[in-house]
Every structure is written in structure tokens, then in C-alpha cells.
Image (cartoon, helix red, strand yellow):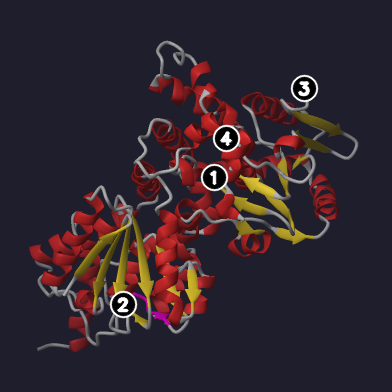
């Protein structure tokens, strides 16, 4: 895998009881591909299976946690799914399977991170867009750098295709709707005020280190017991239901019709390339 | 009484104020409900703005109370699945409330049912739960968090605009002179989303609201109204 393709690396420090999961695709704003999502999930499996690990830290290499999923795969992911290449346009089942497998399903990235049995700490730096936002929402603790920004610019292009239950539970209903409809980006201080992050720091590494040390001092049984109590609450909150709804609506939104004056990201990407389309579609966040 | 304008994907509904809803003016409420439903079905509309041009969004109505008989009309117009509040809460388009001055009773119920709220610095928000049994407490809890919603409902405290923003009841607080322009700018931002995307996003949200019991809480309005009536009769003593 080349650097441009990206990778997610895992570093285990059994002596200090912690793991580091680092997204490495600096040249592309750490935008995640499906292959990277699968790697991420495999690392979570390793972390969960290792009794010496109590805490997992999630971070992005370089300036951003993650500025989203890779839009070059926006169409490809459906074509590659079972039943996706049977006809000219991917079938509805292929779209559902693709979104479920990589992102929202039982073994998708978000569900898997949310249900990690160890304490998860995300270091939110720079652009925490789309995938970056959901890594934030699915973690137990979030330490933000002063320059962190949170948004889902893709929603402005197609509509809302992500889970809303965690967002509503974390920041409240009207603020969720602000992110959904108004094309808003929240800076780190706003995110702190809304409850999306637990702290804002000029040097987040220091705070992450402090939290890792603190969590690593907790007995293993205590951590896993508390995590299962959280899983029970998540089930009661209907998070599984909301993730399934996100899959269904996301698959439908991959098939929408645009009105004559509406911006079509995929058409822009085909005509002008991914970088130009991303720049144009995110200009409102500046 | 209800002025409607559609331009650039935005349907603007303008009235003198919304206090008629607190007074249980069924004709006004039904006309407003029909207007909202028509705009929701309009393929030229992505956003519905509720605006009062009389100074106060919904001034206080002393001694307001739901109809004594909790009639079929009251259920149809206010409390029922096809009534005003549920038409707003489960609307297929994005609903924005523009709040200036006093927002009391049904006005606050409208704010809870709307998606986005922009408020003038001088605005204030009374709890709707004392006067308006159709007000949805689950929406309040999801919006403000449970502890704050309980305190608002129990104490009946009036929240000033800054506090309303702090607790998440409103999205933006702006100077009164800038209110209309800010609402128009917000509505314009929402229209950047494709029409299909707006409707499907609202459907996704409805699934989450359903899972949290918002619909069930609307169903309980009849019971809340009956309880309120009994409390009033007890207060008044034997006739």
C-alpha cells in the first residue's frame, strides 16, 4: 500500500497498557478509504483481544484527525459490493451492503469503535470532518486542539446520511439540526460548550498522556464492566436503530435527483477532479 | 391574517403574532396548519420560516386554557397526528422560527417543534408546559437536556435569549435590527442542500424522534389537558 493510499497503524505498549491507532494519509487530509476502515477495525479487534491493553488512543498523523471519507470511492464502494456490478448502476442492495460493511453495520468502523471494550480517547486536531466527527462521537473521551473544527460538509451536497442518535444525545436536538441543515462548522471552543469534546488544549498530547496514565491505572474488570454498562445504555437509546436508519437513508441518498440549480458533487468531481470538487464544496466552511 | 410568500426555495409565513394559538383560536390554528402542510408539499420550497411582525412572537395570554370539553376540534387542530404541532415537528421541510420579543405558551411549543430558531437579543422564552398541553416534553428534553427541561417545566421560569442559547433552545442570538437578515441568511444556507436531500434528511430525523418517543408524547396531550382541567376545577372549588 503506498502512502497516498493511506494506512492505519497500530502501536502497542503493553507495559504502559495502551494502544495507539494512527491514521496515516497526511497528503489527503487523512481521508479514510474502505481499506483503511477495515484496517482500523482489525486493530480494534487486536486491542479488544489483548488483556494487557486498557486504553486505545485514536489520532491522525499531521495536521488533521480526518477530513472525511475518500470521495474517490463514493461511487466505487457501491460497484465493488455484492450485486454492485450486475447492471450499469449499482443495485440498491449493493449500496446498503457497502455502507453497512464499511461504516454503520455491526463490523463497520463506527459501530466497532463505539463498542470497543477498552477506554477510547480521540485526539481531535484540525479538520474533524465527516469520518473525523464520527470518530469523535464514538470515542469515550475527546481531547481537542485549539484548531479543531467539526463539520459534515457532505451533508450539504446530498443530505444527511449519518447517525443522528449519538449527535442528539451529545449536543442536543437543535444543535444537531444546525449541523444537519445549516452547513455549519464548529470550532473547538463551540464544541466544548456543546459537550462534543471534553477539553480544549494548546498541547493535546500532554492531556492525552495524562488521561492514558489515569485510565491505565484502573483495574481491567472495572473498565470492561463500565463499558458493558455503556453498551446497554446505547442499546436503550436506540443507537443500533439509528445506525440502521443511517444505512437505509444513506443508500437512498446515493440515488437522488438534483434540481437544475443544485450542486452535484459527483458531476463536479467527474468534470474537474476530486481536489477541485472538494475545495468548491467546502468553501462555505472557511 | 396569515401572509405567505414563496421565493428562492423559502416559504415565509408571516402573522402579527402567534398568541392566537395560546388562546386556542381553532380557525387560526387550522389555517396555519394548512399553510405549513401546503408548503411542505410544495416542490419549490425547502425551508419554511415562521415570522411574527407585531413586535412579540407570542405575547402572554393570561388565563389561557385548553377547551373544557377537549373536543374533536381541539384534537384535530391542535393535539392530533394531523394537527398543527405534529405537522411542524414531522414536517418534510426545514422549519425556522424567527423570535423577537416575548415568546410564551404556544409560541414556545412552536419553537420546540421547529428545526432552527434565531432569536433577537431582547427575546425571552416562557415554559409552554403550564398552558399548552400539546407542548412536547420529549422534544424539550432532547433539545435542552432532561434536567433543564424539567426545571423549565416545573418552575415556569422565563429564559432570556442568552440563556436560551446556552441551553440549546435557540441556535443564534442576534441584535433585533439584524434578526430578519440573519434568518434570511440562515434559510438561504439551508437551501444549498438538494430538495431530495432535505426531505430524506427529515425522514431520517423522524426515525430518531420516533425512537425517542416524541410521537407518544404528543399522544398524551389529551391526558395532560384533562389533568390541567381537573386542577383548575379543584382550584376554583365547588360551584
Residue at x 36%, y 63% (from the top left corner): B96
Which chain is home to disc 1? A
Which quarter of the figure is the C terminus of chain B placed in?
Answer: bottom left
Would residue A225 be found to the left or right of residue A248 on screen? Answer: right
Q: Which residues are magenta?
A: B123-128
- Residue A111 image label: 4
Q: Are marks 1 and 3 on the same chain?
A: yes
Would you say residue B204 is visible in this rendering? yes
Foreground: B71 or A253? A253
- Residue A281 image label: 1
Residue at x 31%, y 72% (from the top left corner): B51
Of the image marks 3 and 4, the number of the one nearer the N terminus: 3
Would residue A230 be found to the left or right of residue A118 on screen? Answer: left
Residue at x 51%, y 70% (from the top left corner): B167
- Residue B130 image label: 2
Asked if the residues shown at circle 1 and circle 2 are in contact, with their CB atoms under 8 angstroms apart, the answer is no
Which secondary structure is most common in the magenta stretch? loop
User: On screen, A89 above or below B42?
Assistant: above
Disc 4 and disc 1: Cα gap in Å?
28 Å
Amino acid at each position: 500500500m503506498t502512502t497516498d493510499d493511506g494506512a492505519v497503524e497500530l502501536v502497542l505498549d503493553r507495559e504502559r497498557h495502551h494502544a495507539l491507532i494512527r491514521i496515516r494519509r497526511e497528503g489527503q487530509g487523512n481521508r479514510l478509504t474502505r481499506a483503511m476502515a477495515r484496517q482500523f477495525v482489525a486493530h480494534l479487534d487486536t486491542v479488544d483481544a489483548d488483556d494487557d491493553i486498557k486504553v486505545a488512543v485514536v489520532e491522525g498523523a499531521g495536521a488533521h484527525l480526518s477530513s472525511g471519507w475518500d470521495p474517490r470511492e463514493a461511487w466505487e464502494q457501491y460497484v465493488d459490493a455484492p450485486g454492485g456490478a450486475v447492471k450499469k448502476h449499482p443495485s440498491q442492495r449493493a449500496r446498503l451492503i457497502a455502507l453497512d460493511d464499511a461504516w454503520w453495520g455491526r463490523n463497520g468502523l463506527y459501530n466497532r469503535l463505539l463498542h470497543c471494550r477498552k477506554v477510547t480517547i480521540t485526539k481531535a486536531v484540525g479538520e474533524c470532518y465527516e469520518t473525523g466527527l464520527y470518530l469523535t462521537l464514538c470515542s469515550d473521551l475527546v481531547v481537542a486542539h485549539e484548531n479543531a473544527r467539526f463539520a459534515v460538509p457532505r451533508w450539504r451536497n446530498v443530505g444527511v446520511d449519518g447517525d443522528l442518535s449519538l449527535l442528539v444525545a451529545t449536543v442536543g436536538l437543535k444543535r444537531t439540526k444546525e449541523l444537519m441543515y445549516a452547513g455549519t462548522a464548529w470550532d473547538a471552543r463551540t464544541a466544548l460548550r456543546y459537550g462534543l469534546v471534553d477539553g480544549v488544549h494548546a498541547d493535546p498530547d500532554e492531556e492525552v498522556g495524562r488521561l492514558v496514565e489515569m485510565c491505565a491505572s484502573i483495574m481491567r474488570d472495572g473498565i470492561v464492566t463500565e463499558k458493558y454498562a455503556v453498551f446497554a445504555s446505547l442499546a436503550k437509546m436506540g443507537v443500533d436503530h439509528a445506525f440502521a436508519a443511517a444505512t437505509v437513508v444513506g443508500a437512498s441518498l446515493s440515488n437522488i435527483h438534483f434540481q437544475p440549480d443544485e450542486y452535484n458533487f459527483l458531476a463536479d468531481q467527474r468534470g474537474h477532479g476530486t481536489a477541485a470538487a472538494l475545495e468548491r464544496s467546502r468553501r462555505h466552511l472557511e | 391574517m396569515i401572509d405567505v410568500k414563496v421565493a428562492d426555495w423559502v416559504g415565509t409565513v408571516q402573522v402579527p403574532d402567534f398568541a392566537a394559538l395560546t388562546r386556542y383560536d381553532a380557525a387560526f390554528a387550522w389555517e396555519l396548519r394548512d399553510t405549513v402542510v401546503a408548503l411542505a408539499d410544495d416542490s419549490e420550497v425547502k425551508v419554511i420560516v415562521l415570522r411574527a411582525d407585531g413586535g412579540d412572537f407570542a405575547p402572554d395570554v393570561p388565563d389561557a386554557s385548553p377547551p373544557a370539553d377537549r373536543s374533536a376540534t381541539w384534537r384535530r387542530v391542535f393535539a392530533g397526528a394531523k394537527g398543527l404541532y405534529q405537522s411542524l415537528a414531522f414536517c418534510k421541510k426545514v422549519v425556522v422560527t424567527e423570535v423577537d420579543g416575548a415568546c410564551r405558551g404556544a409560541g414556545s411549543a412552536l419553537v420546540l417543534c421547529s428545526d432552527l430558531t434565531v432569536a433577537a437579543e431582547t427575546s425571552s422564552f416562557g415554559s409552554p408546559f403550564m398552558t399548552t398541553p400539546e407542548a412536547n416534553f420529549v422534544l424539550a428534553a432532547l433539545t435542552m437536556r432532561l434536567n433543564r427541561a424539567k426545571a423549565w417545566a416545573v418552575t415556569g421560569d422565563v429564559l432570556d435569549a442568552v440563556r436560551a442559547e446556552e441551553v440549546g433552545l435557540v441556535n443564534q442570538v442576534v441584535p433585533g435590527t439584524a434578526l430578519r437578515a440573519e434568518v434570511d441568511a440562515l434559510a438561504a444556507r439551508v437551501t444549498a442542500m438538494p430538495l431530495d436531500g432535505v426531505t430524506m434528511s427529515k425522514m431520517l430525523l423522524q426515525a430518531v424522534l420516533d425512537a425517542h418517543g416524541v410521537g407518544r408524547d404528543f399522544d398524551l396531550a389529551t391526558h395532560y389537558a384533562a389533568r390541567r382541567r381537573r386542577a383548575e376545577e379543584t382550584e376554583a372549588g365547588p360551584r
